[in-house]
Image: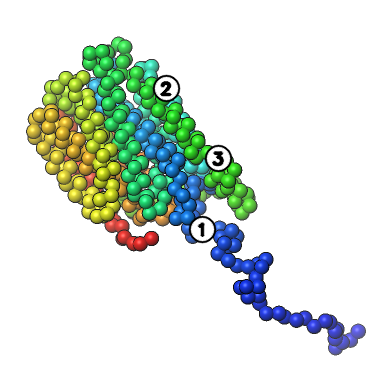
Amino acid sequence: MSQTQTISSPEIQLSPLPTAKTCSLYEITPSTLERRIPNTATKPSSIHSTHPIPNPTPDTPIPTLRLLSSILAFFTAGLNDGSLSPLLPYILRHYSLPPSSAAHLYLSSFLGWLLVALTNSHITSYLGPPGSLLLGSLLQVLAQSLRGWAPQWGLLVVTWGVVSLGQALQDSAANTFVAGVGREAHRWLGAVHAGYGVGCMVGGLVAAAVAGAGGGGVDVKGGQWATFYWVALGVGVVNAGLVAWAFRVGRGGAVETQRDEGRNGEREEEDGGKNRRAWEGLKKTAGNRIVWAISLFYFFHLGVVITVGGWLVEFLVTVRDVPLAKFSYVSTGLWGGVAFGRILLAEPTHRFGEKKMLLLYSLAALVLQVILWQVRNAIVDSVMSTMMGFLLGPFFAAGISVATKLLQQSLHPPALGLIFVIAQAGGTIFPAITGIVANKAGISVLQPILIGLIAAMGISWALVPKVERRDE
């Protein structure tokens, strides 16, 4: 055969490209695109979880049961935290300890939050947000079951850290979930954090009633105060049960669906990849200035709330010389104000702008604190503390709402984890400093410390960038 010989073949007819109406098997429509192409534009994968809890979109109903579970999680945390102020005088007297010993409880609590901040990315990568929520609830159940026996001081201190481990895991996952429910997120965040305030109020009421039972004396030997923790244990069990139910893994559920997608599209992912992405997330978070600005605000904010909530009753009993049994309920007014503030002030705070309104609340709280300091009357102190709690109520939810708007979604879990641990640092350092200084100079130092903290809180909030409002 010569090189110039040609080979004849049937003529190949090129038909026109199919039109939109003639496409069948390969028809490109929005629905097929949604099925074939991962929706990374609207649902970015979390760098901390290979199977995050999907947040609702405008086309999906709001998951009411999960929101109720989130509210109960915060109520459970509040029930624990709100009980400390009325119980602290009993605890110190039961173990024959000076006020400075309360620093051990706050330090243990901080270490729990710190541990979660360092490991939350990895825990969520392996367990997923539902697993983190359930683990957090079970840790709180464990701690409350140990407290009810009025254990040795060292073990009691350890339980504070265990409770904080559980709270940190639940708070981070629940906040991330609720902040992404859509345009109504600010309202749901207000409701969830109001659950914390209500829990603090109820915890204060029940703790004061239980500890003061039998005539209001301090039961040094019997540890009557510890009976409260059996109540907290019961609520914790319900919390764990609701988490397991609301965030359950089932056919077509959030976790299983995401795992199926992972098996089809990312089968090569290994544990090392999860760890690498987790560390990358922490690195990006640590280098973000907005995260540090918001963290500084929460550092002082929680310092204010936990300090006044923890030491108010001791201040009234020692400085104002009032009966412990009668005024152990004062902290309930503070937390009741916080709860109502989170409910009633959430909408006006969002409507008129978080930046402006929180600065206004800070100034008003500062004025109330000066009145509380200068007017030496226990009744006035009680009223002022309740009003101050009302003004401080919307701060936490508003800060979370602003943070989730300023930060990209993939940074929400690590950023919130870092923000919370720095907030807890403030909630640990300042109450502990108050106790240490009070051990030398008296608990009257509480008032000037609070005035300085409120001023620092307002200034730090002024440093947070303003959210540019836009229609979504």
Alpha-carbon distance for marks 2 and 1? 44 Å
Residue 47 location (% of width, % of height): 49, 50
**Residue 258 place in picture, x, y as percent:** 56, 48
Quarter where residue 265 is shown? bottom right
- Specify the farthest residue to the right: 1
Which label's residue is closer to the chain start, 1 or 3? 1
Number of the front mark, 2 or 3: 3
Nearer-N-terminus badge (2/1): 1
Q: Helix or strand or loop: what does disc 3 sit on?
A: loop
Residue 136, labelled with which disc?
A: none
Give 464 or 119, whichever is nearer the viewer: 464
Measure the C-alpha gap from mark 2 to mark 3.
27 Å
Picture disc at residue 249: 3
Is there a contact, CB below 8 Å, between mark 2 and mark 3?
Answer: no
- Label 3: how many Cα within 10 Å (few below 14, some 14–19, many 20+): some
Residue lying at the far top of the rendered structure? 221
Name the amino acid, label 1.
Answer: Thr
Residue 159 visible to an observer of this rendering? no
Disc 1/disc 3 C-alpha distance (Å): 23 Å
Which residue is identified by label 1?
40
Residue sitting at x 40%, y 36% = 73
Residue 330 higher or lower than 361, as above or below = above
Residue 191 shows in the view: yes
Identify the colour scheme used: rainbow
Nearer the observer: mark 1 or 3; the answer is 3
**Residue 347 position in % (x across, y down):** 28, 49
Element type at mark 1: loop
Residue 145, numbered circle = 2
Q: Is residue 160 left or right of residue 138?
A: left
Inspect the image, locate mark 2, and give the three-letter code of the amino acid beneath it. Ser
Q: Secondary structure at mark 2?
A: helix
The residue type indicated by label 3 comes to: Val
